[in-house]
Image (cartoon, rainbow, N blue to C red):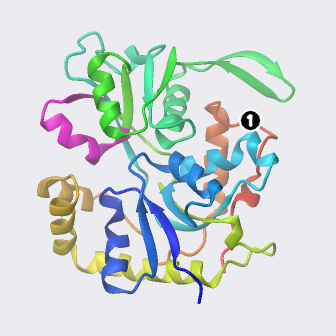
Amino acid sequence: MSAPLKIGYVPEHFSTPIHFAKKYYGLDAELIAFPSGTGHMITALRAGDIDIGIGLTEGWVAGLGKPAFEIGDGGYRLVGTYVETPLCWAISTGAARPEITSVDSLKGSKIGVSRIGSGSYVMGYVLAEERGWLIPTVAIGNAVDSAAPYSEFKVLNTFENLRRAVNSGEADFFMWEHFTSKRYYDSGEIRRVGEIYTPWSSWKVVASTKLVKGDGEVDARVEDVLEKLNKGIEHFNGNQEEAVKYISTELDYSEEDAREWLKTVKFPERTQGVDLKAVERTVVILQKAGVLTTGVGAKPEEMVVKSR
């Protein structure tokens, strides 16, 4: 009998359908929390510590689009879609940082990120591209090297460390999901400077390449996980009050924020499959932002296991 798969996830409000899948629908897997996010899960997948990851689209795509992909097989492939709506990233600084007056004042500052390659790192470049902070400097073949939009990337691993760093001055700002940040605005620990939305659907499911065959077929246990997630999402959609109770008692959110978040999020009816066009759009934007380089790493069609 095969051992249960190990699933990495971020222990935030978005994980509620995973909880329901485990509690009510026999999701036969070991759930492993990664509060530091998608970048950490990429490391764990490549090390064989987890089999499946549920995390941010931009993190997964950036991980497979880097030159390291050419050394091996990248360690994972996108097999499913977990959240259809974009993610709202709040831009935060310390409570007592009067010199930071607006998003524009962050150009050239120290950005705090959980890990290199994580969503918080990638979105720093997306913000810079949107604001016109990326200045082309040197042409290298078909690619253009851009001047760094920030003076330093401070790798701080956890949300708690990021909050501490913007108050101590170790970092000037960081970006994290809006509702996860809001509690700390309300308490006065950190201050909101602005926000930015991902230009893509926000969460994807990936599986280790050990579970994906050359023809794109996935291990039956992966299919079972996706089916159980479908049931967890169906339960989530049909039991909103239970979802609010779980989020506001077991996770780090108020009941009011949980209800507001429910108005903004949409999970797919069927998690199986990934829209290749969405991945292509993500790659193009990450290339514009300087996170990925044209002609390097995996192509979008190589990142995705075809829908079945």
- Which residue bears the numbered disc 1? 293
Q: Is residue 292 above or below residue 48?
A: above
255 or 70, nearer to the observer: 70
Q: Mark 1: which secondary structure?
A: loop
The residue lying furthest to the right in this view is 141
Q: Is residue 69 above or below residue 112?
A: below
Find out whether residue 187 is within the magenta segment: yes
Side of 216 where 105 appears, left or right: left
Residue at coordinates 51% horizontally, 69% vertically from top-left?
6
Q: Amino acid at mark 1?
A: Thr
In the image, which residues are magenta? 176-193
Mark 1 Cα within 10 Å, few/some/many (few <14, many 20+)?
many
48 or 285, nearer to the observer: 48
Residue at coordinates 52% horizontally, 66% vertically from top-left?
81
Tell me where residue 97 appears, x and y as whole percent: 25, 15
Tell me where residue 146 appears, x and y as whole percent: 67, 20
Residue 201 in view of the camera: no
Side of 263 where 43 appears, left or right: right
The residue lying furthest to the bottom in this view is 1
Residue at coordinates 20% horizontally, 62% vertically from top-left?
250
